[in-house]
Amino acid sequence: MRHNLRATRALLLIIISILFSTGLHAKTISLEEMVIEGSIQKPEAFFILPRTALKLDDLDRRENLLLRIIESVENSPF
């Protein structure tokens, strides 16, 4: 019963907002009671991810950054 009342109120609010946005204030619309029946379904999903070996070879730096860090610290910032 509460769902029917909420659906009816939501429908009325939508119609009223449309009427005010279009500037049609003089018209009157009378609506009959609507019954909306249904059920809410919850989604169900499973994710199965296989375990894989991590490839850390790409993370190795081929150049030595120590010299670049020392140069940047020795230089004035401005």
Image (spheres, grey):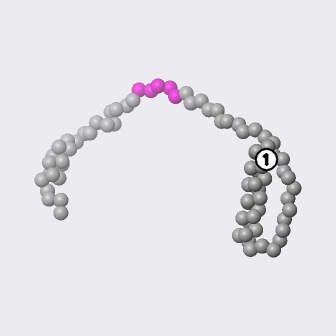
Relative image position of residue 57 (x, y in whole percent): 33, 33
Q: On the picture, is 41 further left or further right than 77?
A: right
The residue segment tinted magenta is: 49-53
Is residue 52 in the magenta section? yes
Q: On the picture, is 72 further left or further right than 19?
A: left
Q: Main secondary structure of the magenta part?
A: loop
Relative image position of residue 40 (x, y in whole percent): 72, 39
On-image quarter of the C terminus: bottom left
On-image quarter of the N terminus: top right
- Looking at the picture, does residue 50 appear above or below residue 72? above
- Looking at the picture, does residue 72 appear above or below residue 37? below
Q: Foreground: 64 or 12?
A: 12
Element under label 1? helix
- Residue located 62% across and 32% down the image: 45
Q: On the picture, is 27 further left or further right than 78?
A: right
Is residue 64 in the magenta section? no
Relative image position of residue 4 (x, y in whole percent): 79, 47
- Residue located 76% across and 45% down the image: 3
